Amino acid sequence: MFIFCILTAFIWGITNWFLKQGSTGLQKIHYDNRLKQFGAEIWYFFTNAQYWIPFLLNQCGSILYYYSLSKTDFSTAVPVTNALTLLITYICDVISRPQLLNSRFLIGMLCVASGVALCVMSKPH
């Protein structure tokens, strides 16, 4: 049932990028009172559809993740899902900002992908 892990990684990886984009205006909110600051930040998130729509989709990914944990070996599902989420989030960043693509990150992505492949191949199916 690795398909659920892969689908979860895609949902999380893509929505992570959209969450980052949707929260860009948060730095402009400044209040002296911590309670007002907290309230204004919460209000910003609830009134910003560019944030809460990806957030809800991300939570759907979390539900799928918990379902995949019940159907897949835990010691394989967790690293596979988290590593692929990292890769997909980075690929989304590179698509939006190609200047992020360099040899160090490509080597890192290759190492992560190799680790995922080793995790999957080491388990009997």
Image (tube, grey):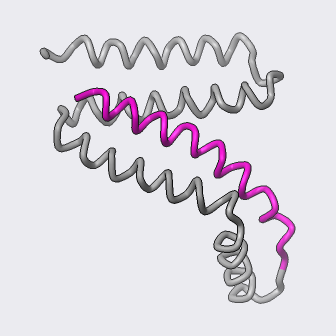
Quarter-of-image position of residue 94: top right
Give the residue drawn at x 38%, y 29%: 6
Position of residue 119 measured from the top left corner of the image (x, y, whole percent) = 29, 19
- 99 to the left or right of 3: right
- 73 to the left or right of 97: left
Q: Nearer the viewer, residue 63 or 26?
A: 63
* Quarter in which the N terminus is drawn: top left
Relative height, residue 53 to residue 84 (above, below): below
* Quarter in which the C terminus is drawn: top left
Q: Is-magenta flag for residue 2?
A: yes
Relative height, residue 57 to residue 95 (above, below): below
Q: Which residue is most to the left?
A: 124
Position of residue 97 measured from the top left corner of the image (x, y, whole percent) = 80, 29
- 31 to the left or right of 18: right
Q: Magenta segment range?
A: 1-30
| Figure disc tally | 0
Give the residue drawn at x 58%, y 17%: 108
Quarter-of-image position of residue 39: bottom right
The prevailing secondary structure element of the residues shown in magenta is: helix
Relative height, residue 63 to residue 108 (above, below): below
Position of residue 123 measured from the top left corner of the image (x, y, whole percent) = 18, 17
Q: Nearer the viewer, residue 11 or 31?
A: 11
Give the residue drawn at x 19%, y 33%: 72
Q: Is-magenta flag for residue 75?
A: no
Give the residue drawn at x 24%, y 46%: 67
Position of residue 80 measured from the top left corner of the image (x, y, whole percent) = 36, 28
Relative height, residue 30 to residue 48 (above, below): below
